[in-house]
Image (cartoon, rainbow, N blue to C red):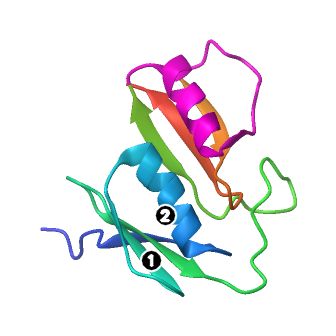
Amino acid sequence: MPLAKVGAVVLDCPDPRALAGFYAGLVGGTVEGEGEWVDLEVPGGPAIAFQASPGYVPPRWPSDDGSQQFHLDLTVEDLDAAEKEVLALGARPLDTGDRSRTFRVYADPAGHPFCLCAC
C-alpha cells in the first residue's frame, strides 16, 4: 500500500489564473479560485494548482547549468493536431528537432516545459 497519493501538482508562476486557463484549455477541467492560489480540478486526475510567485524566473530548457525544475508528460492521440491546439493556446515550441519522435517539447505561457506524447 502506498504511503501517499498525488493530491495536486503545483506550479509557481507570475499569474495563477492565466496559467490555469492555459492548462484548462489543454487538459479540460474547472478553474477554481482567485489571487495567489488557483486550482484546476481535472476530471479523473489530480488537481493542478498554480501559486503566485513574485520574482518568478522560468526554467531554461535545455540547460547544462540549470534545471528544468519540473515538466508534465501529456498523452495525446494525434501529435500534429495537439500541437496546433497548444500553440493556439499560447504554448511555444522548445524543441523543433526530430519530428519522427513520439514526443514534442513545449513551454507553457509561464515557461514551464511540458511534452506532448503520442499514446
Residue drawn at x 41%, y 29% as measured from the top left: 76
Q: Quadrant of the N terminus?
A: bottom left
Residue 83 point in image, percent of width and height: 58, 28
User: For residue 61, which numbered disc appears in the image?
Assistant: none
Q: Does the magenta-highlighted stretch encompass residue 21?
A: no
Q: Is residue 51 left or right of residue 61?
A: left
Name the kind of residue labelled 1 in the image. Answer: Val
Q: Residue furthest top?
A: 100
Q: Does the magenta-highlighted stretch encompass residue 91?
A: yes
Q: Are marks 2 and 1 in contact (CB under 8 Å)?
A: yes
Secondary structure under tag 2 reads helix
Q: Please give the residue where the numbered disc 1 appears in the rendered image.
A: 38
Q: Earlier in the sequence, mark 2 or mark 1?
A: 2
Residue 24 point in image, percent of width and height: 42, 54
Q: Residues within 10 Å of mark 1 (few under 14, many from 20)?
A: many
Q: Is residue 6 above or below residue 37?
A: above
Residue 28 point in image, percent of width and height: 34, 49
Q: Is residue 86 above or below residue 51?
A: above
Locate residue 40: give its quadrant. bottom left
Name the kind of residue labelled 2 in the image. Answer: Ala
Residue drawn at x 63%, y 74% as measured from the top left: 15
Q: Is residue 59 above or below residue 117?
A: below
Residue 102 point in image, percent of width and height: 53, 21
Magenta-tinted stretch: 77-101
Q: Please give the residue where the numbered disc 2 appears in the rendered image.
A: 20
